[in-house]
Image (cartoon, rainbow, N blue to C red):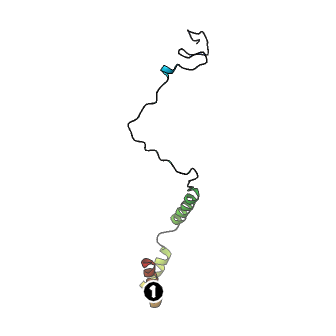
Amino acid sequence: MPNPITNNPLLLPGQDSIGNAPEASSPQPQQSSAPDTSITSGDAADSTDLTGLASVLSSSARTAASIPAVRTDVVERIRAQIDSGTYQPDPDAVAARVASALRGIQS
């Protein structure tokens, strides 16, 4: 549709001969009363890549999900030994494991 004033099909009403809108009709940026909450970095080189970490975490989660929380084979074996009266835990090994666990908690 040609501009009715200039009869130029490339210009819209209100544009000058090279297509610019007059100064009076150019939109003014609106002022916002809201505070600026944008976050900017002081250095454009600052960056973080979490892809490798995400891959390791995902793989670890899959591995952990595939391991049963309770080793039922061990529980059943020890239960059978207790029932038959043949369960003989080594007191020194038990004490060493308890001491090791306590050292790990205290560190």
- Return the residue nearer the eye: 84 or 52: 52
- Return the residue nearer the eye: 1 or 51: 1
Q: Residue 74 appears at what percent x and percent y?
A: 49, 78
Residue 102 occupies which quadrant of the picture?
bottom left
105 lies above or below 40 = below
Q: Residue at x 46, y 77 (%)?
A: 75
Badge 1 amino acid: Val
Q: As drawn, which residue projects farthest toward the left? A: 33
23 lies above or below 90 = above
Q: Quadrant of the C terminus?
A: bottom left
- Residue 64 visible, this angle: yes
Q: Residues within 10 Å of mark 1 (few under 14, many from 20)?
A: few
Q: Which residue is mark 1?
A: 94
Q: Residue at x 43, y 83 (%)?
A: 98
Image-based side of 94 in relation to 15, left or right? left
Give the structural element (helix, strand or loop) at label 1: helix
Q: Residue at x 60, y 15 (%)?
A: 17
- Residue 79 visible, this angle: no
Residue 83 occupies which quadrant of the picture?
bottom left
Q: Residue 58 appears at what percent x and percent y?
A: 54, 59
Count of numbered badges drawn on the protein: 1
Q: Residue 54 appears at what percent x and percent y?
A: 55, 58
Q: Quadrant of the N terminus?
A: top right
Q: Residue 23 appears at what percent x and percent y?
A: 51, 21
- Return the residue nearer the eye: 97 or 53: 53
Image-based side of 34 in relation to 47, left or right? left
